[in-house]
Image: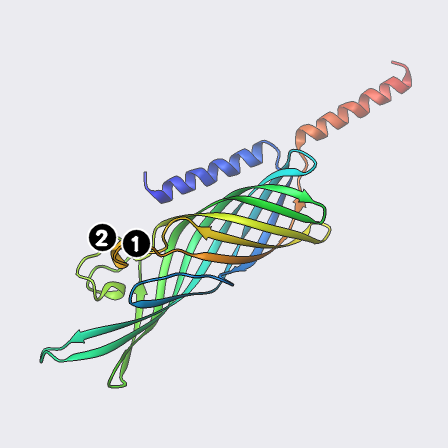
Amino acid sequence: MNNRTLFLLIASCFLFCQLCYGQFYIAPKYGFNGVVSFSEIKDATLKKEQGKQFGIELGRSFLSILSIKGEILYTNDAYALVKEHILINQNQQEYLLNESVAIKNGSLSTNVALSFDLGKFELAVGPQLDALFSSKGNGSHQFAQDSSISVLYNYLEDDAGEGAYWNYPLKPDALFENSKLGLNVGLSFELFRNFYVEARTNYKWTDLINKYYTQDLSVEQFDLLLNLSYRVPIKKRKKKEKDAKSNDEEEFGFLGY
């Protein structure tokens, strides 16, 4: 069982449990990621840029101040990669090649969090798992002679010696990790009834890039994410039946039966 299959299995089980055992609300979400971030990669500059995300959040209250919520989001992460290469031509002369690529990574993200109700504010803490489904880039190779060529990369499908891996004789795995585990800490504010704005951090516990491409240099990432959501309450069927039964008992009792 690969990482993607395991991820989809966990996400499906989570959705099934929420739907069967009485979620309190469902909330469409939309937001931005990468507002603040950091990462390191040897001999290159990898900058996290503003990306987007959208999906749904499910939540259920247990106590007056405690609830559990989870979400499934499609996340579009954006990166800017700049790297210098010193190449040798057939005449054994060295020349400089500047590689500049804009990268878009599409992931399916799921997280579960405990949420504490603080009036208009909610504090939530929990883990997040990201599964990478697409990773593409477009940019250019700029030569010292002021000439350049356009490049298109597919980091998941390109083979060694071509595309994104034109300078690598081997490709043991894709440049970016297929799955990442992180920790979310978020604070939500209710602007008006059922409409929330949320700011949260996501610190990745696992590396962003496979170690083969960084020569054992850890590449970590920290993001600030902003989300908007509108919570649509969903009542449980059992509760409706119980309320209806209570109303019938009151009616019969009033009539003297």
Q: Position of residue 149 (x, y in %)?
A: 28, 78
Front residue of 145/202: it is 202
Cβ atoms at labels 1 and 2 below 8 Å apart: yes
Question: Does residue 45 lie above or below 28 as drawn?
Answer: below
Identified at 53% across, 33% down, the residue is 17
On the picture, is 198 further left or further right than 218? right
Q: Quadrant of residue 162?
A: bottom left
Q: Position of residue 112 (x, y in %)?
A: 52, 42
> At numbered mark 2, what does the secondary structure look like: helix, strand or loop?
loop
Identified at 61% across, 51% down, the residue is 187
Quadrant placement of the C terminus? top right
Q: Which mark is residue 172?
A: 2
Q: Position of residue 71 (x, y in %)?
A: 54, 46
Crowding at dot 1, Cα within 10 Å, few <14 / some 14-19 / many 20+, comes out as some
Identified at 25% across, 83% down, the residue is 144
Residue found at the very far left of the displayed protein: 91
Front residue of 224/194: it is 224
On the picture, is 255 further left or further right than 122? right
Total numbered labels: 2
Q: Amino acid at mark 1?
A: Asn
Q: Amino acid at mark 2?
A: Pro
On the picture, is 32 further left or further right than 107? right
Residue found at the very far top of the displayed protein: 257
Q: Quadrant of residue 40?
A: bottom left
> At numbered mark 1, what does the secondary structure look like: helix, strand or loop?
loop
Quadrant placement of the N terminus? top left
Front residue of 20/219: it is 219
The residue identified by callout 1 is: 210
